[in-house]
Amino acid sequence: SERKKNYVIIGGGWAGWGAAKALCESGDNCDVTLIDALPDPTGSTPYLSKNGKPVEAGTRGFWKDYPNINALCAQLDIDENDVFTPFTNSSFYSPDGLEATAPVFSDATIPELPLPSFLKTFGQTKFDSSQPLPPLPSPLGQVLATFPLFERIPLSDRASMVGLLLATVDCLGGDESVQEQYDRMTAHDLFIRFNLSKRLVDDFIRPTLLVGLFKPPEELSALVVMELLYYYALAHTDSFDVRWIKNGTVSDSLISPLATHLQNEYNLQVLGGCRAGNITIMEDQSNGVLKATSITYTDTKPNTMDKKTIEDIDGLILALGCKGMESVVKTSPDLAKFPVFSKAASLKGIDVISTRIWFDKIVPTRTPANVFSRFDALRGSGGTFFMLDQLQENNPDLWGSPGEDEEQEDTLRGSVVACDFYNAGALMSMSDEDIIATLTDELLPSAVPKFADAKVVDSWVGKYAGTVSWFSPGSFNSRPPLEGAGPILPNLKCAGDWVRMGEREHGAKGLCQERAYVSGIEAANSLLRSSGIGMGEHKVLPVREDEAQFRMGVTVNNQVMKYLPRFWVR
């Protein structure tokens, strides 16, 4: 009988699980193994603090245009209303107070604007703000929805963004060579060349980038910033609407049901607590093509530390971030010979700190999701705080297993707040106690004064050095392609939010769970094609088509750029 194919996936994030799903469901006669350093990448074992309370490495949002993750929920019979919150507003706070509110665009109402004088003869002085905002083309819909929500930034400063919208049309509507030109620029340089208001950049754009792409504009590729701006201002009006996990964590709400499905239905093997090592590459004697043939890994579970090898590999997917890629390439001399992998391994990641604080009383806030802006205590990092008691309806599970004196514990159960820092290098050397004190003594009370009256019952801090993708200027060509080294090594593919997907590029961009998941599916589909499998490719759903005015703008711009040099890019 025909030998089963043997596929291995390294990495248990969204990309790894997307790849595992596509391979398992392909109909190919195969065994699929997923390797990850986490003790239990399936999400079935809760990640707990030392005091037994549930914690999570970062709070992640789910945007409107996540069609493939939404389809996954439907396939697994997961009711989205049970897993996700409604779409929510977010508040931006600075030392001066509330700066702005990011709206739920799909729930926006007509702003209270003065009526033109010729309409006042009918006895009405302003538009009826109780009426929902009708569907409008972008960016008009976004402008009207956000008009009353900027507390301090004058309209003239906001209007300075117009030139940047034109640059976004040029960048995203161009081919890869155009996008490489934008990639070589910093976003800061682009803002200067298009005369963006310093106040708009400092008070709104910079904090948005610090919590959206985890770096300030002077350290980010203009290309990736244009992708984020597209969703905020030029995609569909409601494309920037975001919701959050309603109960538990991303792992136990979404990854665990998927893992259970794949393990029960397709016998997926998951090796948790295992660190991938050397990948052997040899020439296939039958056709002279190079192929990955084996991989070693170390089982790091307590009292084991065994080194093992998976032989006779037919396909391998590296569903890794920059730190994982660096580790694997360093231990794989065969892999390091390929410039595409050694260049990817040279890219650095971003430091992130996640915290969770349990308070003794409920602290009301304007919105459940919030952003810190311009506070000296941030030390150059971006900061967010999420009111989990609001997002998860004060679920007792937020407090973990009940203690011996349940009645006393109940009286102390107040707000549970998840606070995250991005670009957190200047905070990493601080003790956990000092990080919590910075939040409870400075940042949180400055944003919401009632935090000063709440006492900390328990806290947790998680530090993750260099783990998040950094889209630095000029990094585009060093990011790994979906196809890996290409035809010379056809059975090794790459997946992750930082991967260049080429012709398979998806509408979800940047640091995005949907993009990571889709990249895993596409990497698996590519591996199946390279293996000679002519059927069973997993369907990938596109995001909504660009609006007509954006498509028209791209067409006009591309014609103009045939004659006008891009003097603003390098």
Image (cartoon, helix red, strand yellow):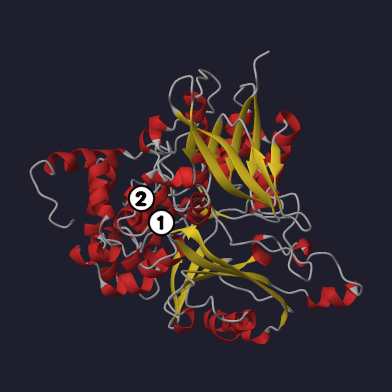
Q: Which quadrant is home to the N terminus?
A: top right
Tell me: residue 552, above or below residue 438: above
Q: Position of residue 45 (x, y in %)?
A: 76, 53
Residue that carries the numbered disc 2 in the rendered image? 478
Tell me: residue 206, above or below residue 392: below
Mark 2: amino acid? Ser
Tell me the CA gap for discs 2 and 1. 8 Å
Tell me: residue 33, above or below residue 104: above
Mark 1: amino acid? Ser
Q: Position of residue 497 (x, y in %)?
A: 47, 48
Q: In the image shown, does 44 or 165 lie closer to the viewer?
A: 44
Q: In the image shown, does 476 or 373 lie closer to the viewer?
A: 476
Residue that carries the numbered disc 1 in the rendered image? 346
First-in-chain label (2 vs 1): 1
User: Does residue 180 appear in the picture of this structure?
Assistant: yes
Point out which mark residue 72 bears.
none
Q: Name the side, left or right, on which 86 lies relative to 426.
A: right
